[in-house]
Image: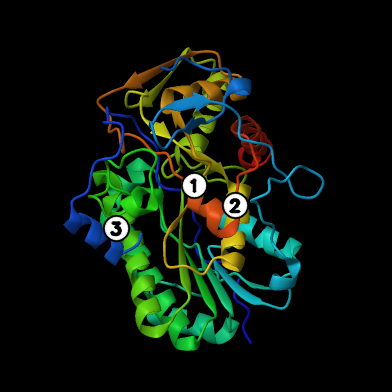
Amino acid sequence: MRRPTVYGSICAAPIVHPMAAVPRGRPARDPASARRLRAFPHACGEVPPFLMEHRHLSPESGTASLHPTPPAQTGGATMLPDERVSSPGFWQGRRVVVTGGAGFLGSHVVDRLRSLGCRDVVVPRRAEYDLTTEDAVRRLYHDARPQLVIHLAAEVGGIGANRENPGRFFYANAIMGILMIEEARRQGVEKFVQMGTICAYPKFTPVPFREADLWMGYPEETNAPYGIAKKALLVQLQAYRQQYGFNGIYLLPVNLYGPRDNFDPSSSHVIPALIRRMLEARDAGAPEVQLWGTGEASREFLYVDDCARAILLAAEYYDGEEPVNLGTGGEMRIRELAAAVAGACGYQGRLTYDPTKPDGQPRRALDTSLARQRFGFRPHVPFASGLAATVEWYRTHARSD
């Protein structure tokens, strides 16, 4: 039997850009809107990097306050009462396909699977299995015979890549997911885990984003082809559950960051792009770094290994039809983020902004209560620690390649 090896890679939702003012609070819904939602469930100055933590939002007021993510650990550190841990007994002996398993997020998922004793992990490589073609998808399922599929493979990029490749990003992401889900149904796969994207949310979603708001409007225009392609897969999973009893779950991660990220300036997301620019500017002695937009956009960031842990918790404990947000529940302006990255990289020059460049979605921050309630996920890695680890990884790995 041919053993597949990785298809593609996945990063977080596309690159962050600046914020326009958005009304706080949550708009009232008319009865017809509520029925539609039920039909488809679901100034700041520059802060030193050692003080940077996400702004945690009050769902009632929409206001934010700075405080660190509560420490929680596995194996020797404090766990909160509503947290769960992955069970080696669940994973040992299971055959698991992880598409995108050699990519940024996927490689961390594979590492965690192996640490849990899952020895039969299949990572299909694009050279062997082009998942945008039906024949390759069928061969993958025939060769791997998976019991559980974690579909992370995607064609993604930052705001520039989204502007240059809207058709490709729509087609590739839609067709991969459609084919993978359909063949999983045909082959009787026990469970399918589909990764969505934060940019599937409407452009002016009230903060914090709640899963029921996913259908309230059109996504931010730059990311819309990618976001709508991914959102269509939620509809497919819900329709298959209704008609065939197919067990597929759908997760919505915020922007990810961490070691092994993509640092290519043509396709990277905001944190790796900033790290690379700040280190290059420091080394060149550049007096100034100019960044896109106004710097007033807000984003939420989740450390990649926390996201990998969340995916495996959901795969083990969650069997519902509702999409579920994965994040920290915090919010950070791009201006604050840039100052934090500059500090972590040792760059002391000026940071300026070009407001003629596109802003992207005005704000992004999630309500993460469903992830805690449904499968006991809480993030463990504070932003300052994760950023330091990411900078160090790039210094010792990516820059030497």
Task: Give the percent coordinates (x, y) of residue 159.
Answer: 34, 41
Tag 3 residue: 228
Tag 3–tag 1 contact (CB < 8 Å): no
Q: Which quadrant of the view contains residue 15? A: top left
| Res 377 label | 2
Residue 372 seen in the current view: yes
- The type of residue carrying mark 3 is Ile
| Number of disc labels | 3
Tag 1 residue: 368
Task: Quote the CA–CA distance across marks 1 and 2.
Answer: 9 Å
- The type of residue carrying mark 2 is Phe
Q: Which quadrant of the view contains residue 84? A: bottom right
Q: Which quadrant of the view contains residue 347? A: top right
Side of 328 where 173 appears, left or right: left
Determine the residue positioned at 58% across, 84% down.
145
Task: Give the percent coordinates (x, y) of residue 172.
Answer: 35, 64
Q: Which of marks 3 and 1 is in front?
A: 1
Viewer-proximal residue among 170 and 316: 316
Say what secondary structure mark 1 lies in: loop
Task: State the scheme by which the image is colored.
Answer: rainbow
Determine the residue positioned at 30% across, 52% down.
165
**Quadrant location, the C terminus:** top right
Side of 38 where 335 appears, left or right: right
Q: Is residue 120 above or below residue 258?
A: below
Q: In this view, does 358 lie above or below 369?
A: above
- The type of residue carrying mark 1 is Thr
Q: Residues within 10 Å of mark 2 (few under 14, many from 20)?
A: many
Q: Is residue 202 above or below residue 389?
A: below
Say what secondary structure mark 2 lies in: loop
